[in-house]
Image (tube, rainbow, N blue to C red):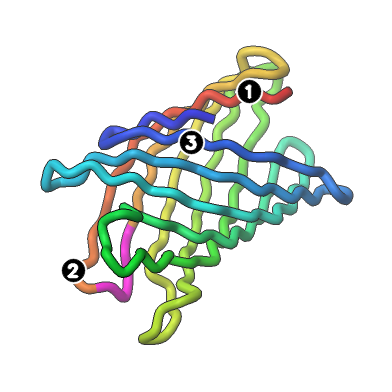
Amino acid sequence: IFNAISRGGAVDLGILYDFWDNFTLRGYYPFTRRNEQDDRISNIHRYCIDIKYEKSIRRWDLALRTRCQSRYKNISSDELGKKPDNHNRSKLSIAYDIYRSPLKPRIWAEVFYQLNNSDGNEIDKIRFAPEMSYRINNNIRIRIYYIIEKEYNVFDPETNYILGTSLIYKM
């Protein structure tokens, strides 16, 4: 998967395993290179494990995913070594399969819960996004999405608006 982000870019490498009806397990490494507002470039390394449950009901696709993520940003920037940001990310999505159409609209919401905050773990980010995917063939699809990302329980919280695209190839 390659994601084009207005302030940088990302590449995800991973493996997906269907281990039970409607359940999948995924382990992967996403690398992101991001242009910061102060003209610095950040390299972000993440290590993730997902468990996802998907269910189709008529033309509707429902999915619930939980992700354990360890995120390192600018590893060489701290002489004592960089402590990772660890989160549990829970995501709920709903998609509709339009009859005889390669288009598939989806909406989703995701909650970020801290796992290693010394001041106490709490929700620190929520994302919401509408998304549209287009199936080119059985193996390739492209998607466009618009994420509204709001920070909570942090000093000087930000709201980010992210327009992105993805190209997905399934083997």
Kindly identify which residue carries mark 1: 169
Q: Could you tell me the amino acid type at mark 1?
A: Tyr
Name which quarter of the figure residue 124 lies in: bottom left
Task: Give the mark nearer the N terminus: 2 vs 1.
Answer: 2
Identify the residue shown where x is 70% and y is 53%: 52
Q: Residue 102, position in %: x, y? A: 63, 18
Q: Secondary structure at mark 3?
A: strand
Q: Nearer the viewer, mark 2 or mark 3?
A: 2
Q: Is residue 115 above or below residue 164?
A: below
Q: Residue 66, position in %: x, y? A: 63, 60
Q: Nearer the viewer, mark 3 or mark 1?
A: 1
Q: Could you tell me the amino acid type at mark 3?
A: Glu
Q: Nearer the viewer, residue 22 or 4?
A: 4
Q: Does the magenta run of residues contain 153?
A: yes
Kindly identify which residue carries mark 3: 131
Identify the residue shown where x is 46% and y is 64%: 112
Kindly identify which residue carries mark 2: 156
Residue range in magenta is 150-154
Classify mark 1: residues with Cα within 10 Å, few (<14), some (14-19) or many (20+).
few
Predominant secondary structure, magenta span? loop
